[in-house]
Image: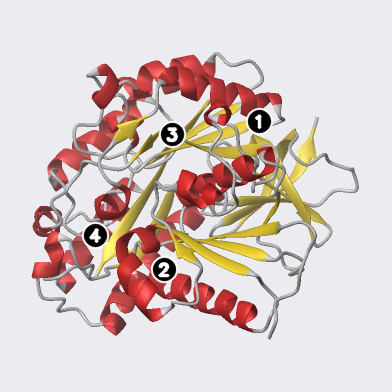
Amino acid sequence: MKARTRTKDKVNIITLGCSKNLVDSEVLSGQLRANDIDVVHENKKIDHNIVVVNTCGFIDKAKEESVQTILEQVELKRKGKLDKVYVTGCLSERYKNNLEAEIPEVDAYFGTLELPQILKQFEVDYKAELIGERFLATPSHYAYMKISEGCNRTCSFCAIPLMRGQHVSKTMEQLVAEATGLVRSGVKEIMLIAQELTYYGLDIYKKRSLPDLLNRLADIEGLEWIRLHYAYPSKFPLEILDVMRDRPNICNYLDMPLQHASDRMLKAMKRQITRAEMDELIYAIREKVPGICLRTTLIAGFPGETEADIVSLQEFLTQHRFDRVGIFTYSHEEGTSAHDLIDDVSAEEKESRAQQVMETQQEISLELNQQKLGQVFKTLIDKKEAGRYLGRTEFDSVEVDNEVIIQTDKKLKIGSFVNVRITKAYDYDLEGEIVP
């Protein structure tokens, strides 16, 4: 069937996977718009003629979703509803040759660092002067900001270095300029992201420079919240916490994936830390920043894991009472050192263990939320849905954490801050009323 013709291209970008991918899509969008090309994100109208699928290749489920999305777009092209389908991102970086052979209908595949090559498909050049400028896919009051690319860690389960390469930091000047531009455009909250935040600066400043960067970002007028995601626990630089404690616009929030609590599993995962060292670190963090919200991510079903290891993990959660916990089931990724191990935990058992761990955390989460009853929190209004407003406190990041449900007859501005007294507490959400 003949593809429909348009007088001007319109590009739809579909982003799969993590917030780091989202930033890449926003950068691509900014470059296209600067070259006078119409671009949208996740367009449901199908009034576009070109699609760029930004894929994820992190674990099996993500890879399956990426392949399915590519096939759906190829089918739209076959029916004449699209002129071109391009694929980029982690899956494309890792499996480009396989994808070209299996889904040849895609017009071109690109890796994670091939933005200029993507732009050439549109007969435009990469504009270096736009560094840091993006067309946000998020609501205008918050944005993710990637402070580095790649990772030098050698965790046995992780394929990210295969897809994203070695750690490369952006300069502080670049990041301050980017953050200043975001604030100028209306952003109130910036979430710092990287494969490994605490490694920031080692490559260009020869020292861990995240504390220096945080101080410079905290000086930006109008930047209300700075949030830290993905800090590695081994050799964690505690001076980060001094800056967090001293600067009021740095959220008392730390996302630090620990992955497990059994020494056997930590060693097999090549995490470079022991359970005792993690205990000591968590106590030190909470001593330096009383009331800090700690979020962690765990893995269930790693090769060789036993029920005793899961019990150890549950005991660890009970001991430290994390505010937020997410859990993945282990994915046997080729090219990682863990791929040499026997994937000896069935998919069903992995899911069962993950559920077992989350049941423990669910009780903890409810108890911690109940302690907030009657307290007043500064709350950022994210959206209005089904006649009620949904917001977040400084202890909650977008999508993965609690929301604050607000029932009010007042008209609240999206992206504004209000004070909310908590009146109801649920497992993973809060409800409250506005107070002066």
Looking at the rendering, in which quadrant would you find the N terminus? bottom right
Mark 4 to mark 1: distance in Å? 36 Å
Q: Nearer the viewer, mark 1 or mark 3?
A: 1
Q: Earlier in the sequence, mark 4 or mark 3?
A: 3
* Residue 59 % position (x, y): 34, 66
Q: Is residue 338 left or right of residue 406?
A: left
Residue matched to label 2 = 62
Q: Residue at x 78, y 42 (%)?
A: 414
Q: Earlier in the sequence, mark 4 or mark 1?
A: 1
Mark 1 to mark 3: distance in Å? 20 Å
* Residue 375 % position (x, y): 63, 37
Mark 4 to mark 3: distance in Å? 21 Å
Tell me the SS state at disc 2. Answer: helix
* Residue 227 % position (x, y): 50, 34
How packed mark 1 is, by other alpha carbons closer than 10 Å (few <14, some 14-19, many 20 or more), is many
Mark 3 to mark 2: distance in Å? 31 Å
Q: Nearer the viewer, mark 4 or mark 1?
A: 1
Mark 2 to mark 4: distance in Å? 25 Å
Residue matched to label 1 = 188
Q: Earlier in the sequence, mark 3 or mark 2?
A: 2
Mark 2 to mark 1: distance in Å? 30 Å
Looking at the rendering, in which quadrant would you find the C terminus? top right
Tell me the SS state at disc 3. Answer: loop
Say above or below: 249 vs 11: above
Residue matched to label 4 = 313
**In front of the other: 249 or 368:** 249
Query: Can residue 249 be seen from the camera position used here?
Result: no
